[in-house]
Image: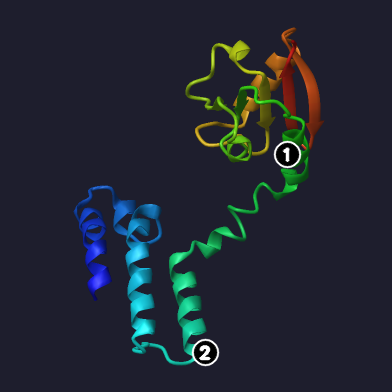
Amino acid sequence: MKPLVGAIPCLALNILADYQPQKDLVHQYSIPAMPFLLLAVISTLAAGRRWLQNRRGIILWSLVAFLSLAKFTHFGGKYLVSINTYQATQEAITQVQTQGSVYTTSQIAPHLSHRKLITLTSADFPTANLDAFDYILLNIHQPGLRSNQEFPVNLVNQLKNNQKFNFKYQGDDVYLFVKVP
């Protein structure tokens, strides 16, 4: 029980929070308690006082924990929504070769995270200065968070008529524009 004392501050903050996702185990707010839980399990195993003695029980509890805490319903829907443009997105990402700045959607940005400047597209706050970016990478089917279907379509049409950007790649409604040097 001693290792669990370190998890008390995290647990207390989560209980006292007004933000509802912070109160459940599904979101990342409970992650700081994990090292202490792991230490408790390790010390219990080292002392030979295992709660579950057989392998089947451990596998069953692991499966129950996964199904209750993971958003497994997203695997068939939300997570697979971008599978139809996956190949085209990967091809476009490979063509972004320099450390240049990128204007892209929230789904593509993690794949380009080693850049110094990445700005996420947003229909609420459309960027006024496209000249600040070396690459503009858009996916019309998945416009990203805080965006809508019209925003990337309008932006693609605007960029096709912009002399400062060259059209470099298009596949499955994924578009890549590169700033003219």
Query: From the viewer's perspective, is 25 left or right of 101?
Result: left
- The location of residue 58, given as percent across then percent down, is 47, 84
Mark 1, residue position: 89
Mark 2: secondary structure: helix
Query: From the viewer's perspective, is 161 left or right of 105?
Result: right
Indicate whether 81 appears above or below 57.
Answer: above
What residue type is disc 1 on?
A: Thr
Q: Residue at x 44, y 70 (%)?
A: 68
Question: Which corner quadrant of the image does residue 137 belong to?
Answer: top right
What residue type is disc 2 on?
A: Arg
Mark 1: secondary structure: helix
Label 2 or label 1, whichever lies nearer to me, is 2
Q: Residue at x 34, y 78 (%)?
A: 43
Regarding residue 173, the answer to whether it shows in the image is no
Mark 2, residue position: 56
User: Can you name the residue that lies furthest to the bottom here?
Assistant: 54
User: Can you name the residue that lies furthest to the top here?
Assistant: 163
